[in-house]
Amino acid sequence: MPEPVLSAGAIRKRFGHLEVLKGISLDAGAGEVISILGASGSGKSTFLRCLNLLEVPDDGRIALGGEAIAFKQGRRGPEPADRRQVQRLRQRIAMVFQSFNLWSHMTVLQNVIEAPVHVQKRPRAECVAEAEALLAKVGIADKRDHYPAHLSGGQQQRAAIARALAQKPEVMLFDEPTSALDPELVGEVLRVMRQLADEGRTMLVVTHEMGFARDVSSRVVFLDGGRVDCSGPPAEMFGAPPTERFGRFVQTHR
């Protein structure tokens, strides 16, 4: 078996007395599109944030391309042992947020080239050319000089996807990328995500879009109460739900 691109083992996370993640394990192979489903409060977004170390797990292991992230015990609990390793690995994992998280004082083009120019230290002209190609790819080339406030929600999210792609990531994490959008704008973002899946990108997608999970995913993982309730190919998961809990979830999200 080839080495997983991203591997998470027995991830636990608590906030005060509330244990949100209770030992979640997941391996993502190259080119896999994994849809992570679950009711509100099941731990989906927290798990994704742990993978990118926006939240530090209380226990468990994370490895990217076979390189394990080193942790140590700090005064307030576990913390990364090597900040430079974290910075390096974060350049290989890109995250697209529910609320877009674009810098409001920068144009769309400036948002897209910020990390390649200032973090990756690549030539500006090269980054601009790549950014323009990415904005064309997501269908907003004509918005390169606009500020985020002048874009629709769907356009902002597509700009955020272009910004993530500009990092040349090995893995893309999507945290409910359409949940903040008006219904008529959801389709334009999902089209871009389907295109990325067709290109063979490794993607973990927290979503409530059942059609995307059913039609685009290579695997569906269902979380319930901070644990993996069940997982499998979408045809099997939706055709004959393997657990009663997932069956009820599917019924309420038709």
Image (spheres, rainbow, N blue to C red):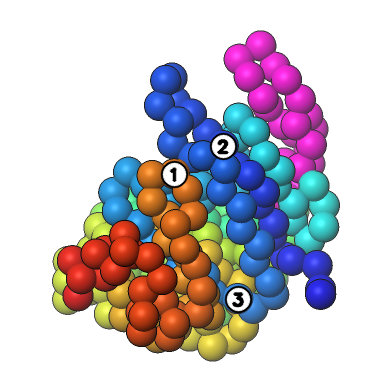
- Of tags 2 and 3, the one toward the viewer is 2
Q: Amino acid at mark 3?
A: Glu
Q: Is residue 105 left or right of residue 233?
A: left
Q: Where is 116 relative to 81, above or below?
A: below
Q: Residue furthest top?
A: 75
Q: Quadrant of the C terminus?
A: bottom left
Cα distance in 3D space between marks 2 and 3: 24 Å
Q: Position of residue 18 (x, y in %)?
A: 40, 26
Q: Amino acid at mark 2?
A: Arg
Q: Secondary structure at mark 1?
A: loop
**Is tag 3's residue or tag 1's residue first in the polypeptide sequence?**
3
Labelled disc at residue 32: 3
29 or 136: nearer the viewer: 29
Q: Position of residue 21 (x, y in %)?
A: 49, 40
Q: Is residue 39 left or right of residue 229?
A: left
Q: Where is 143 relative to 240, above or below?
A: above
Q: Amino acid at mark 1?
A: Gly
Which quarter of the picture shows residue 29? bottom right
Look at the numbered discs 2 and 3 and tell me whether their residues touch, using CB distance below 8 Å.
no
